[in-house]
Amino acid sequence: MRLVVTHEQPDFDALASVALATVLYPGAVGVVGGQLEGNVDELLRLYRDHVPLVAGEKVDLAEVTALVVVDTAERGRLGRFAALVGQVPIAVFDHHPEPTDPIPGATGLREDVGATVTLLCRRLEAEGVVLAPPLATLALLGLHEDTGDLTFDHVHPDDHRAAAWLLTQGANLDLVRRFRSGGTPPELRAARDRVVAEADLHEVAGRRIAIGWWPDHGYAHGVSAIAGDLLAATSADAALVIARMDGKTLVFARGDAHVDVGATLQRALGGGGHARAAFARTTLDPHAAFERLMAELPAHTTPPTRARDIMSSPVVTLPADARVAEARQALAVHKHNGMPVVGEHGELLGVISRRDIEHALRHELGDAAVSGFMTRPALTATPDATLSELEGIVLRHDIGRVPIVVGEALVGIVTRTDLVRARHPRPQRRAPAERVWASLPEGAREVLDTAVALARGARLYLVGGTVRDGLLGVGYVDLDLLLEGASAADLATGLHARVGGSLALHPAFGTATVTLPNGLVIDLAGTRAEAYDYPGALPSVREGDLAADLARRDFTVNALAVRVHPPPVELIDPFRGLADLEARRLRVLHPLSFVEDPTRLVRGARLAGRLGLRFDGDAVAKAQAALRPTVVANVSGQRLRAELEITLAEPRVAPALRQLDALGALGGLYGLRLDDAAVALLDEGRGERARRGERGSRAGEPEVDPDRQQPLAYLLVLLASTPDDAAATAVERFHWTKRLAQQRAKVIAARAAPPPLTDITLAALEPAARRALAALAPQHADAIAAFEHAPPEPKVRGRDVVSLGLAPGPGVGRVLAEIDAARAAGRVRGFAQELELARRLVADEAADRATTGEPATPPPESAPP
């Protein structure tokens, strides 16, 4: 069982992330632990049927095979599920700062965005997932709450994109407004007013910090909201409410862009959260906790911007006796809208603006001295004046510039433009290689550090899907490592010795795979070059350098590398793959790429479907050459079948099949046709069945493996949508079983039958075939569901026949065989009809014995009614 968990006492972002992760990982079970409070509890009770979650205490840890952790990367916040860390593969999706005790996740995504919901939405949107409106609403609610309605300073552009996508999925803004936290609960407002009135204000690194003391010692829900109210009431840069509850000290913190309360509480008290909102629990008494917080705050507080940081210096000035016409010329030359006016010793006398000069010139006073028109005395500030203080001067007095003075000396000037520029610094985007490195899960980075140490003088690169998915910000499945100047097998062997897990060496290709105990798969290869002897052949491989290795790849987005060693970390992009990624474009590397290996069409369709990419026009044109029968005939049916079955095992199959069909490759390579609506229904139904824990087999039928049934169901839909002759050719070419062909025929016959279908018809279909039928013929879906969920009916058994008076022996077998035949033909339904038939057959047996002179059977002691 794959489990999705989050921190205890989850907020809306955590709750929504759990629900979204169960969509991202079909079949995963979402779990909530700890107490749900306030609006979170209320919404979950209302939407329980649409957000299927189980209580954490009901989960048997021994049954968990994989863990997905959302909205935290801190081991200590997982409660009882922390025991699974290091025991099962873990994926981590989180937007918080790195904790002191991180979970060594092997896959997932950690990134500094406004909400974890954003990371999951990015991935789901790329995969073409359609969310149910209730889930979209919950996700939008979590996004709004964690980003302050998209107004917090740490909000990322992707948060806005996620919000826009959720609205297209049917998110309801009215419900977002209804459940969005309304601040302090009514029953705590009197206590809130007391906390605010008695709060202490401290200055830390030039910032105002409000400290509130919770007056009670009992537990109270909703105290966290008081920190936000305290922040607003005091106009401080950060507010901390310190409470003593149930023998522990609790700290609730809210901050603005200048005070990182998340890092402060984490370092001081081991708490968690993000820069604008955080929480900590400690055994320290409240005053000891306060001392630690005050000692830690300066390290996480950004000093305010002051006049000295933004002023222009030296200042262009005008002498007091300058003519008005000269002043106008000076303003034009320096492109200013005003200038300070100084005396003969440089002392500041006043300020003249362009408006003052134009007013004088309208009265033909161009030869007059500027001293007669300047504003005096000048409104000034010192170099220590903060940005807010400078803005206040400009707003109160409606002036465009503030001279900065020390005593009487003019040392600088701040204009409106300077103030606006200070509030709107140009965003600094990480270099691409840094983005890839920063988004790696903690467990993956630790493995890379070990690999670097073992590589010694060799060059080590992240390549292919690892770089591509890191740049797209959709998380990781595995690590692709490329080694130049050393043996991949030697590095893999050394890595395996250090980190454990399993090791597989592939000497013929110069590759190796290390699978770690935490589930991380590391594919290692030496740099290679390759050539194709003829179209469709397997490549011949030889040693090469990095350039040759990247050049042999299929698409530009896969021909990207990040140099890990030697430093610095750097993106290597010889084919402009990054530009293609940003344009969501799939472009082939070489004109003959598809002709050399037509299976690249299938891999490309899979990639495009999974990541929301599109083939560019040139690739579409090149695909047609690869679909010529003479080229396709050179590709073994085994290779084509393997690629299709990998595609049909994707979490969502419809996007990939649509891409393949649009290229003409579904028909050109496989001779199959696509029923888009049926495949889409299979995608939708698979996730729903997995969330309900259904396996697809009926009571009394053998257990089936859902992972095995999924590709078969999609394949049956494709075969049933294809004309008979073409379907028969495909079955023969790709060595699909006779049994599969028989199930196809039964699906087609059942699709054409009028509803309701009989149980006999449905019993003849295997679970995968029933799924295919429900997708191809939705009018039969209810009958299929009723059949699969029907309680097992008893059947007449040998002991029942004996109880009717027939002695044990061959006669019992003959009676049971007759009943089985009648059941299969539909002549009897249910236990009562079978028993009545058994009575008649037993009577016939008795009559036969009487005719042959066999001894009569003594009457039974009891018979079934």
Image (cartoon, rainbow, N blue to C red):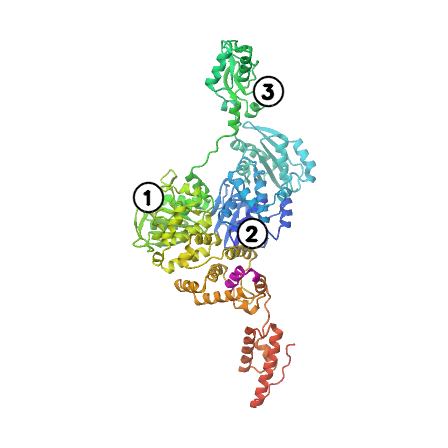
Rendering quarter of residue 226 = top right
Whether the magenta-drawn stretch holds residue 339 is answered as: no
Residue for badge 3 = 397
Estimate the spatial distance between the alpha carbons at disc 2 and disc 3, rounded to whole Å.
Answer: 58 Å
Residue for badge 2 = 30
Q: Earlier in the sequence, mark 1 or mark 2?
A: 2
x and y, in percent, of residue 444 in the image: 44, 46
Amino acid type, mark 2: Gly
Numbered tag placed on residue 547 in the rendering: 1
Q: Nearer the viewer, mark 1 or mark 2?
A: 1
Q: Main secondary structure of the magenta part?
A: helix
Q: Nearer the viewer, mark 2 or mark 3?
A: 3
Q: Regarding mark 1 in the picture, which secondary structure is present there?
A: helix
Estimate the spatial distance between the alpha carbons at disc 1 and disc 2, rounded to whole Å.
Answer: 45 Å
x and y, in percent, of residue 861 in the image: 64, 81
Q: Earlier in the sequence, mark 3 or mark 1?
A: 3
Q: Is residue 697 left or right of residue 246?
A: left
Q: Is residue 437 left or right of residue 771?
A: left
Which part of the image, by quadrant, shows the C terminus? bottom right
| Magenta region, residue range | 765-780
Q: In this view, which residue lies farthest toward the bottom?
A: 853
* Residue displayed at 51% across by 52% down: 25
x and y, in percent, of residue 388 in the image: 56, 25
Q: Answer whether residue 516 is visible to the viewer in this image.
A: no
Q: Is residue 640 left or right of residue 287?
A: left
Q: Regarding mark 2 in the picture, which secondary structure is present there?
A: strand
Residue contact between numbered discs 1 and 2, judged by CB atoms under 8 Å:
no
Estimate the spatial distance between the alpha carbons at disc 3 and disc 1, rounded to whole Å.
Answer: 64 Å
Amino acid type, mark 1: Ala
Q: Answer whether residue 554 is visible to the viewer in this image.
A: yes
Rendering quarter of residue 292 = top right
Amino acid type, mark 3: His
